[in-house]
């Protein structure tokens, strides 16, 4: 059964503790932009930054730079990626406990693993390379890579291009639940991530730690409950 299944993983708040990379990168970006553009660039708290993890870049700037025009937002894109890369090169960035071992087990069991992220293409590629995730995944589908407007669109594209009909979406935000359900996938919600209360309503299972995904998949396989 495992060989027929695809497992689709969100990145931020599911595989990686994004705050270990992004909080300082956002603050440095906004400090630089504030020097150039003044009061249209607000001060950021850590809570402000964590609240936008898992969103697309346009959604992030709508929330954090509502008064900035498109040129300022494109500059913000560039500086944010620059500081994220600096943080990763300096050894920052952490996987959640059990991620590497669990991915190794799932891969060995024959599952096909993919990342589906609302992040930019260069961000996803850089994070996966620096944190050693590349060997576990068949491909990365990012909103930046495909200019996708939503995760639902990304998941539909992945399933079509890889001729996959059944599988599981794993993530911590409402967009993950919606993307999985809209494409006929089972959904595992990650309660340890960045979602607010209620965002995981509609998930088929909710886990408090990453390695608990194995128990959920084993139970579904035993029960023959893969198909929604």
Image: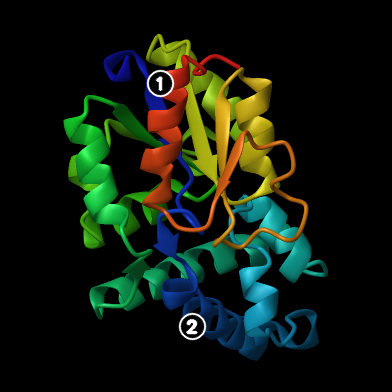
- Asked if residue 76 can be seen in this view, the reply is yes
| Rendered residue at 42%/76% (across/down) | 20
Residue carrying label 2: 24
**What kind of element bears circle 1?**
helix
Q: Position of residue 120 (x, y in %)?
A: 48, 50
Pick the quarter of the image with the N terminus. top left
Measured along the vertical axis of the image, is residue 158 above or below residue 106? above
Comes first in the chain, label 2 or label 1: 2
The local crowd at label 1, few if under 14, some if 14 to 19, many if 20 or more residues have their Cα within 10 Å, is few
Discs 2, 1 touching: Cβ within 8 Å:
no
Q: Look at discs 2 and 1 and give the one toward the viewer.
A: 1
Q: Position of residue 112 (x, y in %)?
A: 30, 26
**Closest to the observer: 31 or 207?**
207
Disc number for residue 222: 1
Q: Position of residue 202 (x, y in %)?
A: 72, 36
**What kind of element bears circle 2?**
helix
| Rendered residue at 54%/29% (across/down) | 154
Q: 35 left or right of 143?
A: right
The local crowd at label 2, few if under 14, some if 14 to 19, many if 20 or more residues have their Cα within 10 Å, is some
Distance between mark 2 and mark 1 Cα atoms: 44 Å
């Amino acid at each position: 059964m495992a060989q027929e299944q695809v497992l689709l993983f969100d990145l931020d708040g599911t595989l990686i503790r994004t705050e270990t990379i992004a909080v300082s990168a956002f603050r440095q970006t906004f400090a630089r932009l504030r020097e150039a553009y003044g009061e249209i660039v607000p001060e950021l708290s850590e809570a402000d930054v964590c609240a936008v993890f898992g969103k697309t870049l346009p959604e992030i700037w709508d929330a954090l730079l509502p008064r900035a025009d498109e040129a300022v937002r494109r500059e913000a894109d560039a500086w944010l990626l620059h500081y994220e890369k600096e943080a990763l090169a300096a050894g920052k960035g952490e996987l959640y406990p059990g991620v590497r071992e669990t991915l190794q087990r799932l891969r060995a069991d024959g599952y096909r693993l993919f990342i589906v992220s609302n992040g930019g293409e260069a961000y996803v590629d850089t994070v996966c390379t620096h944190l050693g995730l590349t060997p576990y995944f068949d491909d990365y589908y990012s909103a930046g890579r495909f200019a996708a407007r939503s995760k639902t669109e990304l998941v539909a594209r992945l399933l079509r291009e890889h001729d996959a009909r059944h599988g599981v979406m794993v993530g911590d935000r409402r967009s993950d639940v919606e993307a999985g359900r809209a494409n006929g996938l089972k959904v595992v919600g990650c309660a340890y991530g960045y979602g607010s209360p209620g965002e995981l309503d509609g998930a088929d299972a909710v886990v408090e730690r990453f390695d608990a995904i194995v128990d959920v998949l084993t139970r579904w396989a035993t029960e023959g409950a893969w198909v929604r």
